[in-house]
Image (spheres, rainbow, N blue to C red):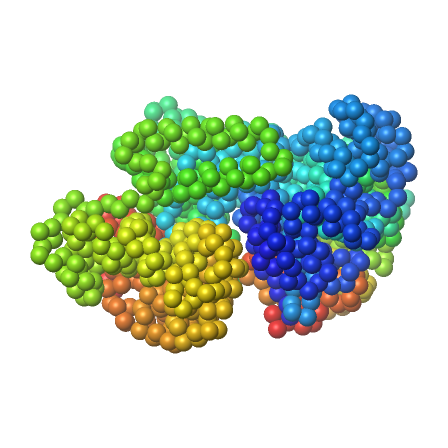
Amino acid sequence: MAMRDLVMGGGACVVPGGDGASSSSNPLGGLADSLLGGASKTQERIRELPGLAGPGQSADLGGRPLTYLPGSEFENEFDQRASAQNSQFLQRFGSKFSDAWGDAVNGHMMPPVAHHDREQEAAFRNFEALYPGMDSAGRPPLALDAPPQRVLSGFFQSFLDSSRMDGPFNAVRLPELGLSEADKRRIRDRSSIMGRHFFADKGDEYVNARVNALLQSLDIDNNLKFREPMGGRHPEMEGYWNEVIGARPGGRPLPDQWAEDFHQHHRIPEPGGWAQEFEAQHNGESWGDQFGEHQQQMAARGQFRNGEMNNMAALEQTRSLVNTLAQNQDPKFQNSKFLQFVSKMSRGELIVEDNQVKPGVTNDWANEFQQQHLPPGDQWASEFMGEHQHRGDRWGDEFARRHQEAPSTSDDWVNDFSRLHVQDWADEYAEQVAKNPYGDGSHESWLDSYDKFVGEQMTDLPNRTASSKFVYVFADQNPYVGHPNPLKEGQELFRRGLLSEAVLALEAELLKNPENSEGWRLLGITHAENDDDKQAIASMVRARDADPTNLEVLLALGVGHTNELEQAEALRYLGGWLQNHPQYSKFVQQDVNSLSHSQVTQMVNEAALVAPGDGDVHTVLGVLYNLSREYDRAIQSFQRALELKPRDYSLWNKLGATQANSARSADAIYAYQQALDLKPNYVRAWSNMGIGYANQGRYEESIRYYVRALGMNPKADNVWDYLKISLSSCAARWDMMEACERRELEPLQKEYPL
Amino acid sequence: MPVFKTAYNGYAVRFSPFVENRLAVATAQNFGIIGNGRQYVLELSPNGIVEVVAFDTADGLYDCTWSEDNENILVSASGDGSIKVWDIAAPPMANPIRSLEEHSHEVYSVDWNAVRKDCFLSGSWDDTIRLWTVDMPRSLRVFAEHSYCVYNATWNPRHADIFASASGDCTVRIWDIREPRSTLVIPGHEYEILSCDWNKYNETMLVTGSVDKSLKVWDVRNPRQEVTRLLGHTYAVRRAKFSPHRENLIGSCSYDMTVCVWDYRAPEDALLFRYDHHTEFAVGLDMSTLVDGLLASTAWDESVFVWPQGMDPRA
């Protein structure tokens, strides 16, 4: 099974090699496993198996050659293009389709070849080339691992997973290689069509507005919008329908005539035509038009770009959509990952702009503006216009202010980017391209532009290199510099729970002794507990550099990368933990850098059998199961570990985070509470507690916990972000939103005491 | 009852018509909005549901269907407009053995003809239905009369040449491939129709599932008025299927996360069972033709359940 996982699992589907050992008991699985050997070996083996076709021959598809399928002659009438090709095709082949089609297609490409499995396979590939896919982006059909998509999937996935194990997800800004036009089209079409399926019964206007909104929240060009259905039954059609039915004996209509009329009645409106349609239905009351006009006026006054306007309206729309969904009392809906996904979108945390998926940080002003100026509900359009007559100016100011601030975000962007393991992608990708049997030039061009992109980034920023993805950033001013024994001081501060102070003391130690592994480790743990993952990982990397076999460091790095959803890295460290463990290293027989998830899990399970009383083994298992999202097992492992180490507060926190991830927020809150009872200054547990409440829709409570966490570590950026979300979700006061925006804790602490 | 966890969000499940413990599951990443797809072939074993083979695709997979002619052939509908043909007896490297690329938008439905056994249909968001045989590299016909996305196209189980199609233009069309155009249009619901299926015992009976949360049963001989309307789902009905074993039974799954089984002829309450085992939108449902009462469902919660009707899927 492990072998199969390796070959078929994950994004990489083309990974030949390995020993092909099979542990599967069922014959097909065994066959599949046995086929996983090297390619040449594979073909030999197949021929030995009776009754099975070799590759390329691909079994007996239709059973018999197709002689006649009724109705094919009608094809001429309806699809000239296809039929012309079809008939040529048929002429060339005669009647021996099933055997000869490959050759014949091949015929004008290369000299005829003898029938042989390999040639047939080649012929098939040529056939694919002759009839290329319809993908407008010209993407090769098997571009399974084209990095943009991989990156994106990871991005979406991480949102969905909410990645709250041991610390919340930090929105990661993606590099510019993000979305192709085709991907944009996909997101646009699919989310709009699906959205319509959920909300259609709210009425045409509602749906249209919301579909539009979804598109705009993705910042996708309206002109490219996917068509809408006609929606609803049209009275004139019904009349006609009854007439036709009535006139026909047996009640069967004349199909052709009816269809003709039907078509005419329901020509799909032009893109953007919903507004007109709406107008037509509501004579004179054309808010669509007015909206447009208003938009133009505003634009003419130079107060904002169209896009901003669209985004703002869109966000409001998507939010209503989420509210509608959220009104469903069913706790299942409340816990739906899909709902969370859409709501991320609606809060502007996820937008697609200039071919990038970004968290909508720079657009949050729109968000807040709406929160303040628009009451929730369906009357948003009229409200919007009404409000704007009066508040246009103020809004403009607000916008201008934001825009001045906007450039400052570019630095964060680089930081985040550097965390994305650029080099790893590039390597991994190059490897896959090399192995891809369908490899062709189109990959190269992508790589080129990618290299160029990376190059530009690097030249812009001389002091950052690809290897410095985790650079520890020391504080500017440190009162502990010059302290006689900063390490001891740091340990003492950590023990007392003064985490931010402990960080400074430990930094002072490390400025003095940069190779102090223990110092780096403790600093890493302090940062993790203080809810700063970036610095935590950077510290742990330094700790590992100083002492590559320290078990606690390896485990901490495994956890850190699990939080960041970097499976390969996490596995490497967890495997390394096992390898360096004096008791368990015997279970590791292979290179730890190439172990699959199931291999590592199996080895750790073996270790757990040998040493059932070692809490660390169960902790590692819990982390591994989190990686594979087997939350039930993860919870069991952590609970087992807690039986052995009931006073390990970080274990309670891990248990809570896992429970939160598997939609058991109530259990999670109990676990966090245990952690806090053991360690009252555990910032991460406070903020996780907030997330736990927010997940249950108890925003007011979540705010109190976030504020408490920030009181202890005002530098926890992600907690500020979460606070903002909760404030906007419970329609908090404008001045509270502003305080949050300015990062002024005092008014918030006054308003939201715990 | 056994449950299987998929890596991506489940979209469709189909029992093999040849092997009673085998099923195919089509999945897509990120709820099918963007990302890769994976076609699973699973088997029920004494140890639960085990994976036989899995194929990865560049785009999400929305539906799948087994060949009625060769137990190893399987077809999937892909978001990139292509139709992938798999041979589960061929090595992974040789798969897909075909990639049929004519649809210009997402392919949302595939269905194999169980009478002729040599052809299948695909329904797409490009508003067309295409007719294919696996031994031809191009589609044999295009049926282009719907004015919006085709969400489902299903062969009649008795007549080799008849099929029905459900569309976002709020109609169901009935087609006879011997005819140049569709033979009947039923403006079946006020809202988009996501699914349709034929009764396996009464060749004129059809069930439709719609965004309006209802199912309707139709007799195509009298298409003016539905035979009955089944209410109970609280969100759009994603799939509706007649039982292969009981004439009166209909299974359905919905965005309300439940799977329901109905007796459409019941005088009082048509709803027989409501299964609440999924935690995200339930979008894939099948009823085994080889084992009476065996159900399979999949959902966006990345799980596949197989259970006998009347039992708790989670038990």
Residue B9 position within the rendered picture, expressed as x and y whole percent measured from the top left? 58, 53
Q: Image check: B173 left or right of A545?
A: right
Residue visible at 41% across and 36% down in the picture: A175
| Residue in the foreground of this view, choosing between B149 and B214 | B149
Is A501 situated above or below B138?
below
Can residue B312 be seen by looking at this rendering? yes
The quarter of the image holding the C terminus of chain B is bottom right
Residue A385 position within the rendered picture, expressed as x and y whole percent measured from the top left? 40, 36
Q: Image check: A492 left or right of A39?
A: left
- Hey, which quadrant is residue B131 in on the image? top right
| Residue in the foreground of this view, choosing between B124 and A603 | A603
Residue visible at 42% across and 60% down in the picture: A579
Can residue B76 be seen by looking at this rendering? no
Residue visible at 46% across and 69% down in the picture: A607
Q: Image check: A139 left or right of A450?
A: right
- Hey, which quadrant is residue A612 in on the image? bottom left
Residue visible at 49% across and 41% down in the picture: A428
The quarter of the image holding the N terminus of chain B is bottom right
Residue A597 position within the rendered picture, expressed as x and y whole percent measured from the top left? 51, 57
Is B196 situated above or below A244?
below
| Residue in the foreground of this view, choosing between B229 and A428 | A428
Residue A717 position within the rendered picture, expressed as x and y whole percent measured from the top left? 29, 49
Q: Image check: B251 left or right of A53?
A: left
Q: How many marks?
A: 0
